Amino acid sequence: MTIQATQNAIFLSNMAQLWRRDPRLAQQIDDLPIDAMLAITPSKKGPATASARTHDGRTLYLHSRYDPEKEADDIVNALEFDDAACIVLCGLGLGYLIVALHRRYGDETRILVGEPDLITLKSALETIDMADAIRNGVVEFLPRCDTPFLHEKLRGDWSKLMLGTRIVAPPVSREISPDFHASFRKSITEFTAYARMSLMTLVRNAGITCRNIANNLPTYVSTPSLELLRGKFSGVPAVLVAAGPSLARNVEQLRAVQDHVVIIAAQTTLRPMLARGIRPHFVASLDYSELSRQFFDGFEIPDQVVLVAEPKAAWTVIDAFRGSDRSKPRRTILLDSSFAHRCMNDKLGSRPGLESGATVMHLAYYLAEWLGCDPIIFIGQDLAFTGHCYYSPGVAIHRAWDAELGRFCTLEMKEWERIARNGNILRKVKDIDGRTIFTDEQMFTYLQQFERDFAKSTSRIIDATEGGAVKSGAVTMTLQNALEKFASAPIAPSRFDYLDANWNDSSKLTDAHAALSSRIEELGDFRILCMETSDMLKQLRGLLGHPAEFNRRLARLDELRTRVQRHDIVHQMVREVSQLAEFQRVAADRRIDPNAPDEQKRAIRQLDRDAGFIEALLEGCDRLTAILNEAKARFEMAMEPS
């Protein structure tokens, strides 16, 4: 076979896999001219090497001119991160490092390749066989490093980024596209911080979240689904009200136009808005903390206000909004929840949902899109410490601080203390006027998610906060100008016909209660299997020196595993309650070298890993049993005559 034919075969094989994994990038490469290639020459050992021009006009070789394959192996063998779950490679060259990394770390390690030059990427795909790495999802080519793009491409890599991320930056990357690679490393670091925060929040709150969802099940099945509101306000402007420090600057303007715009309020802003004579149409909630019930306690909430909440919100908060009159609770919609499906079944639990957001304002934004609103206008969404303040005046936390305020402790001091507490994670961003302003790591990750969302929105996004961090993808405008331009006409009364729906349908409570009772019984059977498995693992630990008996018991263990798999739904529920156990199991897997020469030591580590995981599942069974029994009692109370 000729060299040209070999290159064509390699290119076609690589491209066939790239079309399956990343068709947009494959199309971009196919659109390049056929002769678009780096300057490629044979090395002294034979394998190709390549040269490229630097930004200042110099010619620089991307690999060794003597033996590029050995050079790549030497680089990889010098690395000291055998447990890395994710490797970030700055610069592709002809792909020798991908082959060496894949050979060293296998399919379980993700390789993220920052390479802005499509011609370099095309040259690599024509030269080096990377088809296996592409097909198995090992390698991800990243020709851009902007926030929305990284969020789109890497949303499935959170756990790997958390388990260990290492950056490999060959010296040549400092000469070829140095600005891109500096930005790429910074963006990956910021995304990793975002992933770490999101994943740790998920792990930390797993049990609380499941308990809240289970206790919200009576409300979940008896209230309308989000389908009731789909496209209800198509083309109508929406104003989303957050509780940032800039809110006081312009919120009063909503009083005069509250019949001209759809107002969606964060739960923290409901009380101060009503006190100003502004009635929102919707209020959003997703906070898992019971402290949030203070946002709905102790004041009158108009009947026309609809609460849209994630089921993970504390059930005491949902109950506080619905009120004490069981015959006529306030209007509430809970979003879709996979855990709710598993608690009962898909028939009882299925309903539309929205994309998962990190904050209540993400939820408000996704709701505005679901309603069909355009434009979507933000106020009070600072995502930074405008005026060195954390909160808008009059929010609930200020009332909570009342007892501490005095001559030597002012509200301003409490605000600054709240900011300074995060001193080690403070960072600087630009505000809407181009000035430097402080934010923290948490709000910065929220900003990144908003920018990702804005980049793919079909609605016009307007930032009328009049303060705070500048938001890519949003047009900055004063609220007065936005309202004058978009809120000229009142909303037609027919748009509000959803208020006449059945907002308290108790007909499903009996069936849902029965389905939950069956799930509790199945959970008991699953726990017995976990106990048997735990005992078997302990026995196997003591039989490592007796191969015949060990293998006989191992067959019994496989039988138990098969029986466990028959309880797939309950198994998923227990793992959902025990997110940390799942994460620890994956981490333990990575510490076990399948090629370790000492087989007995490897077997001990595998048994210890499995035993630890089963013990965590048993703890999860106990927690889940308590959660589901509590939810069952909530159903029984809801079914009692009012």
Image (cartoon, helix red, strand yellow):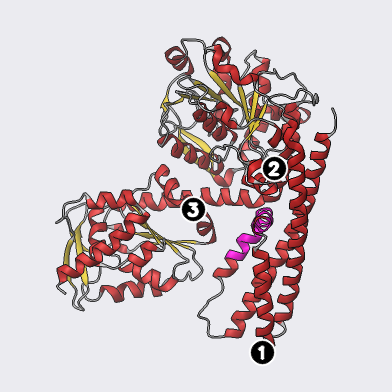
Q: Nearer the viewer, residue 176 or 331?
A: 331
| Amino acid under disc 2 | Ile
Give the amino acid at mark 3. Answer: Gly
Is the residue 110 above or below the residue 501 in the image?
below
Q: Nearer the viewer, mark 1 or mark 2?
A: 1
Side of 492 relative to 106 (left or right): right
Sequence-wise first label, 3 or 2: 3
Place residue 96 in its image quadrant.
Answer: bottom left
Circles 3 and 1 in contact, beta carbons < 8 Å: no
Residue 123 makes an appearance in the image: yes
Residue occupied by mark 3: 156
Q: Which residue is mark 1?
A: 548
Quadrant in which the C terminus is drawn: top right
Could you tell me which secondary element the residue under label 1 belongs to?
helix
Q: Residues within 10 Å of mark 1 (few under 14, many from 20)?
A: few
Q: Secondary structure at mark 3?
A: helix
Query: Mark 2 or mark 1, which is nearer the start of the sequence?
Result: 2
Q: Which residue is mark 2?
A: 213
Image quadrant occupied by the N terminus: bottom left
In the drawing, does residue 91 fall left or right of residue 50? right
Q: Is residue 577 magenta?
A: yes
The kind of secondary structure element at disc 2 is helix
Cα gap from disc 3 to disc 1, whole angstroms? 42 Å
Q: Is residue 89 left or right of residue 335?
A: left
Query: Which amino acid lies under the numbered mark 1 shown in the image of this protein?
Result: Ala
